[in-house]
Image: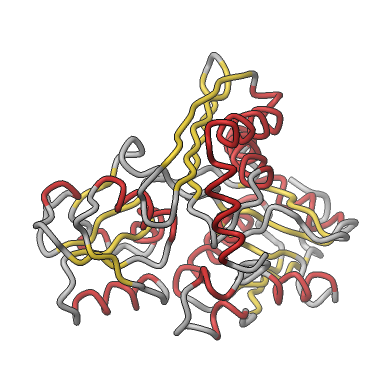
Amino acid sequence: MMNSDAQLKLIIGTRSSDLALWQANYIKKELKKKLKNARIELKLVKTKGDKILDVALSKIGDKGLFTKELELALMNDEIDIAVHSLKDLQTEIPKGLKLAAVTKRHDVEDALIALKKGITIDKLPDGATVATGSLRRRCQLQHLRPDLKIVELRGNVPTRIQKFIDSDWDAIILARAGVERLKMNKYISSIIDKSVILPAVGQGALGIEIKDGNKKAEQAVRLLHHENTYLAVLAERALLKTLEGGCQVPIGAFAEVRSNGLYLEGIVGAVDGSVTFRKKMRGKKADAEKIGRALAKDLKKAGATKILNDIYTKAGR
């Protein structure tokens, strides 16, 4: 326990979506367990990603889409802590800020929301319509099932599920963590195994960002830090950074610390799923970032460089 937690006041900055509020309240609750007398408040911050809901993520650009305004609030000392879904946090943390803690990871898989229980990707009818806002999912889906029709889907978790209920689509795909955290499990038809679709970098983990030098916030959030999750996402984020990927590039990754080292798997594919490159690597957990960079280089050598160049050329980068 920290000294004099009775005088400790912390302000957690959060987006206002149901899932962001769940995440912020979860961090608040966990901090209160450790710091019983501390005063912990939430402050709502609207981000660019919350305001632009009618454009595909891949077309907006993703430098701080769901984080920039929270980071400005940190810099201006309006909040002490920003809670992010780690898959939204860009790999380059702005100068003056730091990723101070990563929480224990929820299950990382994607979930299929379909018309009835037990439906899996391979049981969807020929030419079925599946909605997703993720190029990573689109690529891997089309690689598995070129017959599927993929349509764009944006919005928070309850909104996406409602859009599905009101549509004539056959299925949508969401992160399992978000659906389960919001207790909307009844809509899950099946969990998509990681061998079928690799998750997004950082999926299922929460990242806690603070202003560098804010010692009271750092001491507090370190009480919630989970080192093995941190090392796993460090490897994934190093892979993503080396590939210079983001929302515009179909990249999936999953790392896991086991008793005999850190295992990392990554995938890069063409947006239409016509070609994908998928590779694995194992090393010491202390070399997490090195493993991420090395696997990215392996993927590039295998042919991912051409895919990345094509995507960036079309995006005008």
**As drawn, 293 above or below 169:** above
**As drawn, 18 above or below 254:** below
User: 156 or 79: nearer the eye?
Assistant: 156
User: 25 or 284: nearer the eye?
Assistant: 284
| Residue 117, x across and y down, in percent | 11, 55
**From the image, which quarter does the C terminus lie in?**
bottom right
**As drawn, 276 above or below 114:** above
User: 130 or 149: nearer the eye?
Assistant: 149
User: Residue furthest toward the top?
Assistant: 260
Residue, x 21% and y 59% (percent of image)?
A: 148
Is 271 situated left or right of 63 in this image?
Answer: left
User: 288 or 28: nearer the eye?
Assistant: 288
| Residue 126, x across and y down, in percent | 10, 57
Q: Quadrant of residue 312?
A: bottom right
Residue, x 55% and y 58% (percent of image)?
A: 311
Q: Quadrant of residue 209?
A: bottom right
User: Residue furthest toward the right?
Assistant: 213
Residue, x 26% and y 78% (percent of image)?
A: 162
Residue, x 53% and y 16% (percent of image)?
A: 259
**From the image, which quarter does the N terminus lie in?**
top right
| Residue 115, x across and y down, in percent | 12, 65
